[in-house]
Amino acid sequence: EAGVAQSPRYKIIEKRQSVAFWCNPISGHATLYWYQQILGQGPKLLIQFQNNGVVDDSQLPKDRFSAERLKGVDSTLKIQPAKLEDSAVYLCASSLSGQARGSPLHFGNGTRLTVT
Amino acid sequence: QKEVEQNSGPLSVPEGAIASLNCTYSDRVSQSFFWYRQYSGKSPELIMSIYSNGDKEDGRFTAQLNKASQYVSLLIRDSQPSDSATYLCAFGARGYSTLTFGKGTMLLVSP
């Protein structure tokens, strides 16, 4: 079974620039998550999709972050404009269903973003 | 607001010892509890899940859940240097809910 694919692995940008991350979940997984993990902290959920609908985006800074999951498969996360505090690893994860019980999260390798 | 508290560590144990990692949570409706292991520079990977009060054993790992005390722990028996990593606890409520992660406890197992 192929895992969750993410690209790019690393990205360095200057503040106020824009950046986009891509994620392809495990085939058949209906639920897709984007997490932000700042160094030394646990992952923080930014947005959760169930198929192509948004289930939870309460912690997404909507003035600068946006995400979409067209056709309920691939997803992109965009930051525009970036701030220094956006430096973090952006993790994409997927699960068979949104119900946490019996449906563990599978994480991709993440994208390490550095904003200078 | 849902919160998870973990001691950031590092927790240092000698090889062969039992490592005990603890986590408390604030959300009383939490139904599912997980332990993830994260090696430096890598993504989290699930090692244990527990849904009912009591103990759940899987190889060298035992998860313990006490919902009344809002407490979950992970015991690692016969700790190995390869167990050195950050251990994240996470919990979720019923239904299409997200997981809330703690900050993680760094475990160092010395040979």
Image: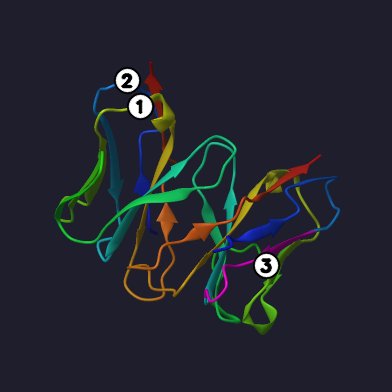
B37 over B27 or under it: above or below: above
Secondary-structure class at tag 3: loop
Q: Which of marks 3 and 2 is in front?
A: 2
Q: Give the range drawn in magenta.
A: A20-29
Image quarter of residue B87: top left
Residue B71 horizontal/vertical position (percent): 22, 48
Residue A12 horizontal/vertical position (percent): 81, 44
Name the quadrant of the N terminus of chain A.
bottom right
Q: Residue B15 carries which label?
A: 2
Residue B101 horizontal/vertical position (percent): 43, 51
The three-letter amino acid code for the residue at tag 3 is Lys
> Do the residues indicated by labels 1 and 2 lie within the same chain of the protein?
yes
Image quarter of residue A79: bottom right
Q: Residue at x 54, y 68 (%)?
A: A58
Residue assigned mark 3: A62
The CA span between labels 3 and 2 is 47 Å
Chain ID at mark 1:
B
Secondary-structure class at tag 1: loop
B26 over B23 or under it: above or below: below
Query: Given contact means CB atoms under 8 Å apart, are the residues at marks 1 and 2 in contact?
Result: yes
Mark 1 or mark 2: whose residue is earlier in sequence: 2
Name the quadrant of the C terminus of chain A.
top right
Residue A28 within the magenta-colored segment of the rendering: yes
The CA span between labels 1 and 2 is 5 Å
Residue A27 within the magenta-colored segment of the rendering: yes
Label 1 crowd (10 A; few <14 / some 14-19 / many >=20) = some
Q: Residue at x 41, y 62 (%)?
A: A104
Residue assigned mark 1: B80
* Front residue of B48 and A70: B48
